[in-house]
């Protein structure tokens, strides 16, 4: 029995993308919270503490399917953390950030025990979904990969370079799938971080421009999130402390979206 609501001891956790950044920080935090059994899916084996490593390309359906078959249940927590920036082709961005996440979530759901959780790493870059919710719902309903890539080509004005839209898909999927997972007594939520000081930051600087990244950070007091900041929010969503939280996209952005909503963001610096 857990000694406190954040206790991960005696749990089985699956994490994607734990070689560096947020995932690596999450491995360290889980040691502090009880040192659970941890299975990592990534292209590279992490240096941090884990029980087993399964080499997995989250952008390849066959690789994800092999990982699903290789993971023994029961599972208590699935952290869908792997992601890539738009320095890659749109199809690859959508495959890793969205399709792989969906495939793994749905493939492992039967192995997640009652009371378990799924926590996705989305982004505040995916916060524009209300402007075209029906299109996002249409996209996430497409099962066939080639059909989805064709859809993306036909809707390039919405999809753009793929990154923001892939995270819109994750946010909307988090809300939509939460009802299905709840039917199995499994909760689904996401964290939506502002820019994070990780090895991927230079890639985001290239695609979003250094000016935009710097402006975003300036609007929230001039501090950039650390991997640990985001990993702590993920560990909350994966723990029993969030037992009544479901279908939530948690902004971990030092207030950026709150300031945006209430008209307190200064856009003049972007002009």
Image: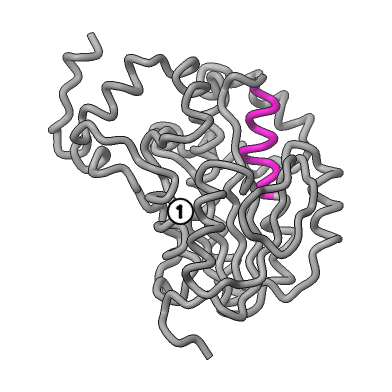
Position of residue 18 relative to residue 91, above or below, is below
Mark 1 nearby-residue class (10 Å; few <14, some 14–19, many ≥20): many
Question: Where's residue 83, x and y in %?
Answer: 59, 38
Residue at left offset 50%, top offset 46%: 22
Position of residue 119 relative to residue 73, above or below, is above
Residue at left offset 41%, top offset 58%: 232
On screen, residue 151 versus residue 25, left or right, reads right
Position of residue 233 relative to residue 59, above or below, is below
- Secondary structure of residue under mark 1: helix
Residue at left offset 41%, top offset 36%: 196
Q: Nearer the viewer, residue 103 or 138?
A: 103
Q: Quadrant of the C terminus?
A: top left
Q: Nearer the viewer, residue 92 or 172?
A: 92
The answer to which quarter of the image holds residue 260 is: top left
On screen, residue 104 versus residue 192, left or right, reads right
Region of the chain picked out in magenta, as a range? 90-102
Instruction: List the residue tagged with mark 1.
Output: 231
On screen, residue 106 versus residue 182, left or right, reads right
On screen, residue 140 versus residue 201, left or right, reads right
Residue at left offset 45%, top offset 53%: 231
Question: Where's residue 194, x and y in %?
Answer: 36, 37
């Amino acid at each position: 029995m857990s000694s406190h609501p954040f206790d991960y001891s005696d749990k089985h956790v699956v994490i994607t993308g734990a070689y560096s950044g947020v995932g690596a920080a999450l491995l360290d935090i889980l040691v502090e919270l009880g040192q659970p059994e941890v299975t990592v899916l990534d292209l590279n084996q992490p240096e941090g503490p884990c029980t087993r490593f399964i080499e997995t390309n989250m952008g390849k359906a066959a690789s994800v399917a092999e990982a699903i078959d290789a993971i023994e249940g029961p599972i208590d927590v699935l952290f869908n953390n792997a992601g890539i920036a738009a320095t890659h082709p749109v199809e690859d961005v959508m495959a890793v950030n969205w399709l792989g996440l969906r495939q793994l979530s749905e493939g492992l759901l039967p192995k997640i025990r009652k009371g378990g959780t799924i926590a996705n790493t989305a982004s505040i870059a995916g916060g524009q979904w209300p402007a075209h919710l029906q299109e996002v719902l249409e996209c996430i309903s497409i099962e066939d990969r080639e059909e989805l890539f064709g859809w993306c080509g036909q809707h390039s004005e919405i999809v753009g370079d793929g990154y923001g839209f892939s995270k819109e898909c994750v946010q909307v999927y988090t809300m939509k799938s939460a009802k299905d997972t709840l039917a199995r007594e499994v909760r689904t939520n996401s964290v939506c971080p502002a820019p994070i000081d990780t090895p991927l930051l230079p890639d985001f600087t290239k695609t979003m421009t250094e000016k935009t990244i710097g402006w975003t950070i300036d609007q929230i007091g001039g501090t950039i999130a650390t991997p640990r900041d985001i990993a702590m929010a993920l560990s909350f969503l994966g723990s029993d402390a969030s037992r009544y939280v479901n279908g939530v996209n948690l902004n971990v952005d030092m207030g950026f979206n709150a300031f945006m909503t209430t008209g307190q963001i200064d856009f003049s610096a972007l002009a």
